[in-house]
Structure formats: C-alpha cells, structure tokens
Amino acid sequence: MYTKDLLEEVRNITLSDLELVNKKLVYLNEEQLSWKPSENVWNIKEVLAHLNEYAKFYHTAFIDRITKTRFKSPGEVFISSPLGRSAWKSMKLGNAKNVKRRFKSMRSYNPSSEISLITGNELSTIQSELKEFLKIIELSANVSLRRVKIPISISKIIRLRLGDALLFVTYHNERHFQQISNLMSLRDFPKK
C-alpha cells in the first residue's frame, strides 16, 4: 500500500467521523445520548467514553513515538506486518458497513464496568480527540510508518508498525461511529 494512500484513507475516515459528531451528535439531547435499546448495549455516551479512553492511550503513544523517532524519512510504500494486518483487519467494517467480528472490551475501557469513564463531556472530548488524531496523521507523513513502533493498549510489549496502528485506531473509531449510527436509526430511538 502506498504511504500517501494509507494516510489519505485514515484522514478521510476520521473526517467522516468528525462530520457525524458535528452535524448530528452535538444536536442530541440527554435522553437521546443516554438511550439504550437493551441493558447489554452501550448508549451513545458510553460509546464516546470508550473512544475517548482509547484516544487518551493511543494519541499519547503516537505523539511520543513520532516526536522521538530517529526514522524521519517516510517510505513511499508501507508494508503491514502479519500481526498488524491481522489487528486492523479484525476491526475493519465489512463492505455493507457491518461488524464482521465482535470483541469484548477490556474492563478499563468499558464504560459499563468503569462508570468513571462517563464524564459528561463526551461530545466535546471526542471532537478534540478527532481533531488531535488528524494532526497525528499529518505528523505521521514525516516519519517511517514501518520503522516507528506503537505499543498496543493490552500489552506494552507488543508493538505495531505506525501504519498498522493508524489503521487499527481508525477502523476501531469507524466501527464505533457505525454503532452510533445504527443506534440512531433504530425505530425506538427517542425523537426530539
């Protein structure tokens, strides 16, 4: 995959996520943000809290590794590692924008288990986090997407290539924004 194509894909998906927040989610009321179709499904606030907690970890790791790397020359072509490809492919939505594989969230990233993740500022935080991620994508264009390594949230020992980590985080975000869209399109979703 060409480096410029990878960066364009993660940028476009992130812009689309930000557009959903700015054009739809900011206009939802508290009842809509807190509505659940059933007890075991996250509401919109919980989905956003989950994304914000992941962003806190990954954005810090991205910025730290990008700013400290000695691998300042970006390659024209990016080659995924087998682990990296497996990670981001598991997150990527299907062609019909459907979730191909479900995952159980770690307790520390699960707002159903960790109530403290719900701050009441989920919308403003996700707006800031998505804007910061766009800046991280721009910074990534100046380093090697293959040689810079990013630790993953479940193990600091396991690291992904920067390009794989960007795809992983982007597809993870896209997956959850699709989850929000699906919630909003349910027949019983509260109207204003």
Image: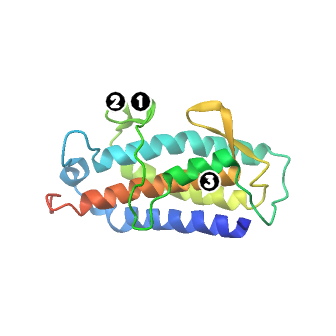
Residue neighbourhood size for the residue with mark 3, other residues' Cα within 10 Å, grouped as few (<14), some (14–19), many (≥20): many
Q: Are marks 3 and 2 in contact (CB under 8 Å)?
A: no
Report, in whole angstroms, how far the alpha carbon at label 2 lies from the one at label 1.
Answer: 6 Å
Residue neighbourhood size for the residue with mark 2, other residues' Cα within 10 Å, grouped as few (<14), some (14–19), many (≥20): few
Please state which amino acid type lies under the numbered disc 3: Leu
Q: Are marks 2 and 1 in contact (CB under 8 Å)?
A: yes
| Quarter occupied by residue 6 | bottom right
Where does the image place residue 25, in percent across and percent down from the top left?
32, 60
Q: Which residue is mark 3?
A: 166
Residue at (56, 36) in percent of width and height: 153
State the SS at label 2.
loop
Report, in whole angstroms, how far the alpha carbon at label 1 lies from the one at label 3.
Answer: 23 Å
The one of 96 and 17 positioned closer to us in this rendering = 96
The one of 119 and 95 positioned closer to us in this rendering = 95
Where does the image place residue 2, in percent across and percent down from the top left?
73, 68
Q: In the visual, does 144 lie left or right of 25?
A: right
Residue at (66, 34) in percent of width and height: 158
Please state which amino acid type lies under the numbered disc 2: Ser
State the SS at label 3.
helix
Q: Which residue is mark 2?
A: 113
State which quarter of the image contains the C terminus: bottom left
Report, in whole angstroms, how far the alpha carbon at label 3 lies from the one at label 2.
Answer: 27 Å
Please state which amino acid type lies under the numbered disc 1: Arg
Residue at (63, 69) in percent of width and height: 8
Where does the image place residue 47, in percent across and percent down from the top left?
36, 47
State which quarter of the image contains the N terminus: bottom right
* Nearest to N terminus: mark 1 or mark 3: 1
The one of 176 and 64 positioned closer to us in this rendering = 176
The numbered dot on residue 3 is: none
State the SS at label 1.
helix
Establish if 78 lies above or below 52: below
Q: Which residue is mark 1?
A: 107
